[in-house]
Image: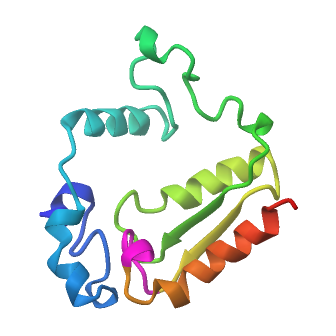
């Protein structure tokens, strides 16, 4: 059910071998429902040339948000580490594409790391992430922290 809801392929969310049995047994507890509104917003972004756009620009509740989230990307100085598993079947290469777009706007500010042998969610909840993934995150954070 999770693969059907979130991606394409079997499995879509993770590589089963990367999950500890305890985690695998609790997947139903770890993933909640998602409203259809979520899918409507994703569809709008896909139909907007694969851009991060506001779902309802006319809604005054969201007036302070930009209609297109990349409009002011050059002014945001915070570096981003985009990560994803090589076998990601949820949003496929969206992190790779977003990094490429930001790289064109502000070259060198953001980084991308694709982890071989990992899917979408197992890069956070896999049994070996403390060895395979987290050291990369810590290195990035330490490289950008200020004393």
Q: Is residue 60 left or right of residue 31?
A: right
In x, y percent, where is residue 75? 79, 35
Outermost residue to the left: 1
Left or right position of 102 against 6: right
Residue at 39% across, 18% down: 56
The extreme front residue here reads: 147
Q: Is residue 129 left or right of residue 109?
A: left
Residue in the foreground of this view, choosing between 22 and 52: 22
Q: Position of residue 84 (x, y in %)?
A: 50, 69
Q: Give the residue drawn at x 76%, y 70%.
A: 142
The colour scheme used here is rainbow
Q: What is the x, y in percent for residue 107?
A: 82, 53
Specify the segment rendered in magenta: 117-125
Query: What residue is drawn where x is 20% and y is 36%?
Result: 36
In the picture shown, does residue 140 fall above or below 21?
above
Question: Which quadrant does the N terminus fall into?
Answer: bottom left
Quarter of the view holding residue 17: bottom left
Q: Is residue 131 magenta?
A: no
Seen at 37% across and 69% down, the residue is 121
Q: Name the residue nearer the viewer: 104 or 110.
A: 110
């Amino acid at each position: 059910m999770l693969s059907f809801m979130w991606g394409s392929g079997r499995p879509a969310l993770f590589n089963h071998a990367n999950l500890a049995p305890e985690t695998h047994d609790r997947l139903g507890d770890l993933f909640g429902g998602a409203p259809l509104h979520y899918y409507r917003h994703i569809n709008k972004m896909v139909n907007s040339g694969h851009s991060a756009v506001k779902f309802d620009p006319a809604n005054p509740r969201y007036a302070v948000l930009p209609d297109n989230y990349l409009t002011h990307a050059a002014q945001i100085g915070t570096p981003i580490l985009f990560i994803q598993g090589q076998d990601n079947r949820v949003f496929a290469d969206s992190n790779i594409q977003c990094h490429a777009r930001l790289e064109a706007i502000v070259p060198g500010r953001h980084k991308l790391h694709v982890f071989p042998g990992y899917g979408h969610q197992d890069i956070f909840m896999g049994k070996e992430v403390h060895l395979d993934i987290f050291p990369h995150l810590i290195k990035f954070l330490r490289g950008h922290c200020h004393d």
